[in-house]
Image (cartoon, helix red, strand yellow):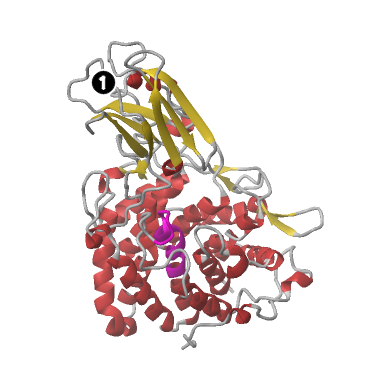
Amino acid sequence: MPDIRPSRRAVLRLAAAGAVAATSLTTLPAYADEIDYTARKTFDDWDRLFQQGGPGQPDQPNDNSNRDGRSGMLAWSQSYVMLGLVRMYEKYRDTYYLDRLIDNVDQVLSVRDNKRGVKDYRGRSLPAWRADHPYTTGYATLADGNGQPLLDLREALSYAEDTTITVTAGTRPDTFTVQLVNTFVNRTVTHTDLSLDPASPDYAVSRIYAAAPGSLQLTAVDRRAVPRAGDVPQLGSSTMHCEPVIFAVHTGMITYPIAIFVRIVLSSPALRRRYLRKALEYLVACREAVAVHDWEYRDGGYLIWPKTQPLAYDGCEQPLNQSVGLGQTLVELALATRDREYPRKVAAMGRMLAGQFTVDAGDAYLWHYWPTGGRIYDGFVKTGDPDTDVSVFTPSGGPARQFEDVSHGAIDVEFAVRAFRARLAFTAQDMARIARTFTQNVVTTDADGLPVIHTTVAGTTVGAPSVAQQAPRWMQANAWDPRVHAQCLALYNRYQPTPERDGQQAIGFGWLLANVAYLNWAR
């Protein structure tokens, strides 16, 4: 069992990166001689460093009441720590990693909404993990001098809580001016001489709707039971507050490594003797969590954001990665249980995702971020009435036809390979083409012959080192082309990511543990 005492940062400068085999990137320059990203010790040292503190700790909520001040930390940081522990167990068969995983999972489950007694925007306290700022719609209520609500302003643009709303007197009686300043995106919106008289051409709800979505994706709704002329909101400043939503992709990312643990334990007589109680406990937790999103699932194998859900594109299909992000957990539940619902949904999601793939000239797959043929991909327009609009919070939007980016694409690939391994979806040809997407479109070399990464599956713009650092999350495709591992290792040896330097971003360095685990896992 590895030494679990806290490590000193000096141990992070490790020796001897291994040679890359079977790839055009076989000759690596001297920058590769400091850290061995395929070494067990590298993962173990950095895992101990992660436990000393920083963003994404397992005992912190997924909403922005956590110490990090922004939501999604369990989904986009701790989930990768847990996944890394699972992959390290699969590689080395040391139950130390399962014990470490249990320690984290118990803490993660302790901060589910129903355990904390907190609710989502519908007032429900559910066995999953809500999120809010910076992802969800922000609300600000303008009230009269007696505190009676008059008007809700709703900002669907991300980082809404960085917006200050200032109400000043209008130039005419019974009118007011609203200015919204979002300091994160550096955008300002001003609506002058608004009225709360529904018969006025300056009626605030109508004026703001006519300008929507605008640069802040602003809409408004009248809060009065009986709207009438003469009401004016109190002058002054306030800020937005984001409503909490439970994202399917967050649930999927968090529960996926937990469900893998369940499947591994239930399939091993030796592990069942030691971990059966935990596996059964976690199985219930995973099933309860994914069931939270049953109302979002559609039989075509995709999820939607139901209309009025306080998100920018309520009423629309979720991005591919967000549908199949939950699908990752469904694959593991399909393997761990006899419940026919899980394989049925995985098969439908597999057909949906496979239908999004197109073959390029190099016999690799291309696909987009938004589902082709969907409302956001095709675009939609206002009807003139919020009740009949596609989306409440973004009355018109799109078309948005960007190719899938490398980081989110890794979620798609993880799902596809696991569904194929479970014999629930996809073909061997699909797997080979996905691998070619990585080796031909995603990774390339620069003018000096050094490895670089593109930002999308279509091989468009060259990405920053931060993009390259996500490459090993495509490692599931390595079984169909060992150059996947070789190219990922070459990228890591070039850019030399470390927790100290690359873990300073808002989500910390949990992602680095998963990537290093994958470099071990496929070695």
Residue appearing at x 36%, y 55% in the figure: 63
Residue 162, given in percent of the width and then of the height, sits at 45, 43
73 within the magenta span: yes
Residue 419's x, y, as percent?
41, 58
Report the side of 274 relative to 317 (left or right): left
Observer-nearest of 508 and 512: 508
**Could you classify mark 1 by the number of other residues whose Cα lies within 10 Å: few (under 14), some (14-19), or many (20 or more)?**
some
Q: Position of residue 384 (x, y in %)?
A: 35, 17
Tell me what residue is drawn at x 30 percent, y 84 percent. Answer: 274
Q: Residue reaching furthest right? A: 448
The residues colored magenta run 67-82
Position of 474 relative to 262 (above/below): above
At mark 1, the secondary structure is loop
Residue 208 visible in the picture: yes
Determine which quarter of the picture holds residue 312.
top left
Quadrant location of the C terminus? bottom right
Q: Residue at x 52, y 55 (%)?
A: 410
Residue visible at 36% across and 48% down in the picture: 132
The image quarter in which residue 371 lies? top left
Does the magenta portion include 205? no
Location of mark 1 (residue)? 231
Viewer can see residue 427: no
Main secondary structure type of the part rendered in magenta: helix
Residue 272's place in the image compared with 340, above or below, is below
Q: Can you tell which quarter of the image residue 60 is in?
A: bottom left
Please name whichever residue, 105 or 276, is drawn nearer the observer in this view of the structure.
Answer: 105
Above/below status of 143 relative to 83: above
